[in-house]
Amino acid sequence: MKVSFSTGALYHLPLRTAFALAHDAGFDGVELVYCPEVVWRGAAFVQRLMREYSLPVLSVHPSVVPYPGYNRAAHILPRLVSLAERLESSLVVLHTPKVATLQEPRGVEFVKVLLRERERCNPGRQIALENSGFYRTSEARCLLHDARQLRDLADRYDLPLTFDTSHAGTSPYGVLGAYDILRSRVVNVHFSDLLPRRIFPDWPPLYTILSHHQLPGQGVLPLSDFVRELLADRYAGILTLEISPTAIQAWNLARARQILVQAIQFVRQFEGA
C-alpha cells in the first residue's frame, strides 16, 4: 500500500512547499491537485519537483477551488488525462456530476467524455470515479451520490473507484457499509476523518475545510476498523491523505510536518501489527 499526500491540503501555498513537506514526512508520493500554478508553470515544472524530491505523482485530481467549468468532465478531464500522461501518473481522479439520471444532458455528456478519455489513456493508466459527500439533504436526489448506483455504473463500464472516507461517512451507508459495496473496485483511498459540526454560513466549501477531511483519529469515523479491512483485503493500491488546510495547521509548516508524520504513523501501525 503506497501512502500518498494530496497537495490540496496546501493549495494556497507554492507547490514546492507541498512536495518538500511530503518528502520530509516520508510519503511514497503525492496526489497532484490541479491548481493555477500547474496551469501557469506546466508539467515540466512538476517533473522538476518530482526529481528534486524523489517523489512520483501517483495520481492527479481536479481543482478543489471552484472556478468556471471546474466540475464539468468535458472541461477538466482532458486536461487531467494529458497531465497524467506527461507525469507518468497511473491514475486520474474524477468527480461525478450532480444529476438525477444519466439520461439528463449533463449525465449523457459525462459518460461520453469519460469513455472517450479512457480510450485515450495509455495502458496502465486509469480514470477512477470518486464517491461524493452529502452536504445537504437535497443531494440525496443525485444518482451517483448513492454508493450502489456508483457501483452499478462502475460495473457497467468496468471502471475503478476512488473511495473517500470522509464522504462515505456522510452517506446513509457509513464508511464500512459504503466500502463493502465498492471495495472490489477501489484503487485509491482518500483518507481523512469527519468532525460533525454546525457550519455558518451553510456553504459546502466550509464543510470541506472545517468538518470533512480532518486528521485521522480526530473525528468520529471508524478509521482503525477501516484500515484493518484494507489490510485484510490485501489492498495494494494508493492511500491518499486528503486533509484540509485547517486540519494540517497549514499556517505553521513545522507543525504541519509533525501532523503529517503522525498521520503516516496512524496507518503504518496497523501494517506493523
Image (cartoon, rainbow, N blue to C red):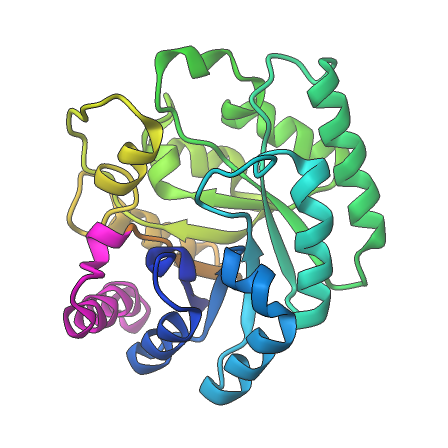
**Vertical position of residue 46 compared to residue 12: above or below:** below
153 in the magenta segment: no
Residue visible at 47% across and 68% down in the picture: 30
- Outermost residue on the front side: it is 40
Q: Position of residue 23 (x, y in %)?
A: 37, 80
271 in the magenta segment: yes
Residue visible at 65% across and 64% down in the picture: 90
Is 240 positioned to the left or the right of 225 in the image? Answer: right
Q: Main secondary structure of the magenta part?
A: helix
Residue visible at 50% across and 48% down in the picture: 63
Is 247 positioned to the left or the right of 242 in the image? Answer: left
Q: Which portion, as a residue range, is magenta?
A: 245-273
Indicate the quadrant containing the C terminus: top left, top right, bottom left or bottom right: bottom left
The count of marks equals 0
Q: Quadrant of residue 108?
A: top right
Q: Is residue 215 visible?
A: no
**Vertical position of residue 13 compared to residue 172: above or below:** below
Q: Position of residue 209 (x, y in %)?
A: 27, 42
Residue placed most toward the observer, 167 or 45: 45
Residue placed most toward the observer, 169 or 202: 202
Q: Position of residue 265 (x, y in %)?
A: 24, 70
Q: Position of residue 110 (x, y in %)?
A: 71, 30
Q: Is residue 241 visible?
A: yes
Residue placed most toward the observer, 27 or 231: 27
Residue visible at 36% across and 79% down in the picture: 20
